[in-house]
C-alpha cells in the first residue's frame, strides 16, 4: 500500500498531467473489471449447476436401459432426447 502511494506521489511530481489521466482512467477500468468478474463467476456457477443436472439425468437414464427395454419404452426415451 505504501509503495503504491509513494509511486503515485513520485509520478505526480514528475508528470502531473499523465498522473491525472492515469488516476481518471484506472478506477473505472478497475470497477468494470470487478463487476465483469462477478458476472462471469455467477454465469459460470449457473452453467456448472445446469451441467450437473444434465449429467445426473443422463446417468439415470443410461443406468436404467434394461428397465426401458423390458417395458419396450425405447420410443419414449428417444423422444425425450429429441432423437426421433
Image: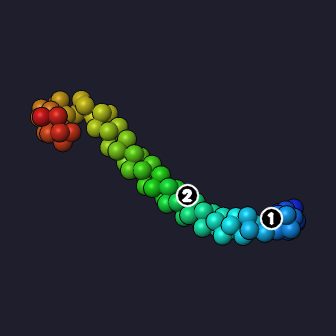
Given residues 45 and 54, the one toward you in this image is 45
In this rendering, position of residue 16 left or right of residue 6: left
Using residue 50 as the reference point, say whether residue 29 is left or right of it. right
Q: Which of marks 2 and 1 is nearer the N terminus?
A: 1
Residue 20 in the image: x percent, y percent? Answer: 72, 70
- Residue 35 at what x, y percent from top left? 54, 64
Q: Is residue 58 visible?
A: yes
The CA distance from mark 2 to mark 1 is: 32 Å
Q: In this view, does 74 lie above or below 1?
A: above
| Residue marked by disc 2 | 37
SS of the residue under disc 2 = helix
The numbered mark at residue 54 is none
Q: Residue at x 34, y 44 (%)?
A: 54
Please give the name of the residue rendered at 32% of the width and 33% of the height, measured from the top-left corner. Answer: 63
Observer-nearest of 54 and 14: 14
Compared to residue 17, the image places residue 79 above or below, namely above
The image quarter in which residue 56 lies: top left
Q: Is mark 1 on a helix, strand or loop?
A: loop
The one nearer the camera, 39 or 4, is 4
Residue identified by numbered label 1: 15
The image quadrant where one finds the N terminus is bottom right
Q: In which quarter of the image is the C terminus?
A: top left
Relative to residue 73, is residue 65 drawn left or right? right
For the question of whether residue 1 can be seen, the reply is no
Q: Is residue 30 left or right of residue 80?
A: right
Q: Quadrant of residue 23?
A: bottom right
Q: Residue at x 85, y 64 (%)?
A: 14
The answer to which image quadrant residue 73 occupies is top left
Amino acid at each position: 500500500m505504501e509503495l503504491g502511494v509513494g509511486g503515485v506521489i513520485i509520478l505526480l511530481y514528475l508528470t502531473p498531467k499523465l498522473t491525472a489521466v492515469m488516476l481518471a482512467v484506472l478506477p473505472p477500468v478497475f470497477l468494470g473489471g470487478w463487476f465483469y468478474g462477478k458476472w462471469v463467476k455467477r454465469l459460470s456457477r449457473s452453467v456448472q449447476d445446469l451441467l450437473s443436472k444434465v449429467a445426473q439425468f443422463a446417468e439415470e437414464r443410461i443406468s436404467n436401459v434394461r428397465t426401458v427395454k423390458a417395458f419396450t419404452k425405447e420410443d419414449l426415451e428417444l423422444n425425450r432426447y429429441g432423437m426421433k
